[in-house]
Amino acid sequence: MKDFKKYYMLPASPEEVYLALTNPATLQLWTGEEAEMSTVPGSEFSLWDGSIVGRNLEFEEGKKIVQEWYFGDQSEPSVVTIKLHPHKDGTSVELRHTNIPDQDYDDIVEGWNDTYFGSLEEFYGE
């Protein structure tokens, strides 16, 4: 199992980024795919037409999202923590993804950089 941590800059306020990550309609706008999402802890979510699925663990509006991502039958949960920090250029996003299965690590990192945060950067016009 591996962990991944990285910071991303987005030219939008933390409140706007939070909505983009938690509101199903806004998620669909920037992903181009149907999304199931709720800010109720314990609720299930599905992004990119089921390519990413898991359970929502914790929310702090405009500041933090914690999710468990599913990777089959792994012994320890894979947890994604996204913290949003105000920055003079918009939002500094702190991403931490723990317990990524070794065989999925490279694909997950590429997904975070290109698909997930790459799509968000495009959405905000960078």
Image (tube, grey):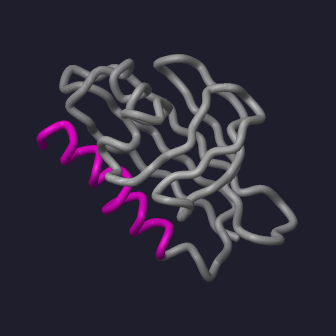
Magenta region: 107-126
Vertical placement of residue 33 versus 36, above or below: below
Q: Who is closer to the viewer here, 124 or 23?
A: 23
Residue furthest right in the image? 75
Majority SS type along the magenta span? helix
Residue at 55% x, 47% y is 96
Vertical placement of residue 119 versus 125, above or below: below
Q: Is residue 110 magenta?
A: yes
Residue 126's image quarter? top left
Residue 107 position, x and y percent, is 47, 74
Q: Who is closer to the viewer here, 51 or 66?
A: 51
Vertical placement of residue 40 versus 82, above or below: above
Quarter of the picture containing the N terminus is bottom right
Residue at 37% x, 34% y is 26
Vertical placement of residue 28 versus 92, above or below: below
Residue at 51% x, 52% y is 47
Residue 81 position, x and y percent, is 59, 41
Residue 45's image quarter? top right
Residue 90 position, x and y percent, is 24, 25
Count how many numbered circles sit on residues in the image.
0
Q: Is residue 77 left or right of residue 9?
A: right
Residue 101 position, x and y percent, is 67, 73
Q: Is residue 42 left or right of residue 109?
A: right
